[in-house]
Image (cartoon, rainbow, N blue to C red):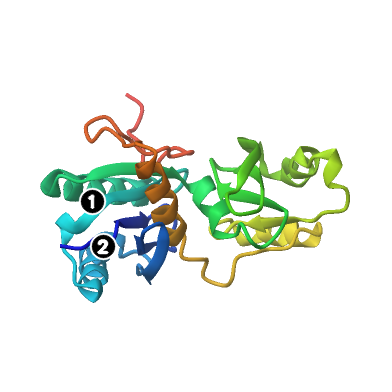
Amino acid sequence: MTNARYVLGLDTSSRHGSIALAGDGAALQWEPLPPGGHSSGLSQSAERLLAARGIGWKDLAGVAVSEGPGSFTGLRIGLSWAKGICLGSGLRLVLVSAHEAAAAMHRREGELIATVLQGERGEAHAALWSGGAVPTRIWGPEAVPEEDLVAALRAAKPARAGDVAIGITAPDLRPPLREALRRAGFPLLDADGGSPVAIAVAERGDARLLAGESADLASSAPAYGRSPNARKPAS
C-alpha cells in the first residue's frame, strides 16, 4: 500500500496519444502512445508506469480520460479501456475536456491561450483561455468555419488584453490551417509531434476527483465534436 494519491490519465483524442501517472496532483512520468497503436499500447504502457512506482491498479484513486472533441475511433478506444479498468478494479472514472487539458498543458506559456481542435469537414473547434496556475475559459468551445477562424479568435480576445498575443495549441489541426494561423501572427505553442496531453488529463482528473466528481461508468460517452468518417449508407 502507499500513502500517495495516484491518478492515471490518458489521451487518445488525437493521433499523438499519451498516458501519464500523477501523484498528489503532479505528473510523475508519462509515455507516448504509438500513432495508430492506441489500443495495443495502452495496457502495456500503463503497467510500466505503475511498476516504475511499485504500485498496482488498486493503489490508484481513479482513472482520468480525455472525453474529446477528437478522433471518433481514438476516443472510443480510450474511454472503453478506462471503463474496463475502473469496472474491474473498482476505481472512479473522470472525464476531462480535450480543450481544458490542452489549455492546462500550456497554461504557463502566455496570458491568452486558444485551443483549436479539428472539427467537421471545413470546421475547427476553438476556445479561448486565460493562462496561469489554472486556466480559465473566456470563450467557447465553438465550431467555427475554417475560413473564419482567425477573425473569430480575434473577436473573442477581451478588449482589456490590448496587445497580448494569443498563443495557439492545435497539435492535430490540418497543416494548412496551422500555417494560416502562424501567418496571421498567432504563436504556435505545440512542438513537432504534439505535447503529452495525458499529463494535464491526469492532473486535472486528480483535481476533479478531489472535488468529489466522477463519471457514471454506464452512461458516460465521448464528446466527439465531429461525425465518424465511416457512416451507414442511407436506406
Q: Earlier in the sequence, mark 2 or mark 1?
A: 2
Q: Secondary structure at mark 2?
A: helix
Residue 176 in the figure: left or right of residue 64: right
Q: Residue at x 82, y 54 (%)?
A: 164
Q: Position of residue 73 (x, y in %)?
A: 34, 49
Q: Are marks 2 and 1 in contact (CB under 8 Å)?
A: yes
Q: Quadrant of residue 2?
A: bottom left
Count all numbered tags in the image, as a single digit: 2
Residue receiving disc 2 = 42
Q: Quadrant of residue 223?
A: top left
Q: Is residue 127 left or right of residue 112?
A: left
Disc 2 packing (10 Å; few <14; some 14–19; many ≥20): many
Left or right of 34? Residue 130 is right
Q: Amino acid at mark 1?
A: Trp
To which residue does mark 1 refer? 81
- Residue 232 lies, with reference to residue 108, above or below; the image says above
Note whether 99 is above or below 29 in the view shown. above
Q: Quadrant of residue 139?
A: top right
Horizontal and vertical percent position of residue 80 = 24, 46
What is the number of the mark on residue 127?
none
Q: Quadrant of the N terminus?
A: bottom left
* In-front residue for pair 90/17: 90
Q: Is residue 20 above or below residue 126?
A: below
Q: Residue furthest bottom?
A: 52
Residue nearest the observer in this picture, 53 or 230: 53
Residue type, mark 2 in image: Leu
Q: Secondary structure at mark 1?
A: helix
Residue 135 visible to an observer of this rendering: yes
Q: Is residue 71 visible?
A: no
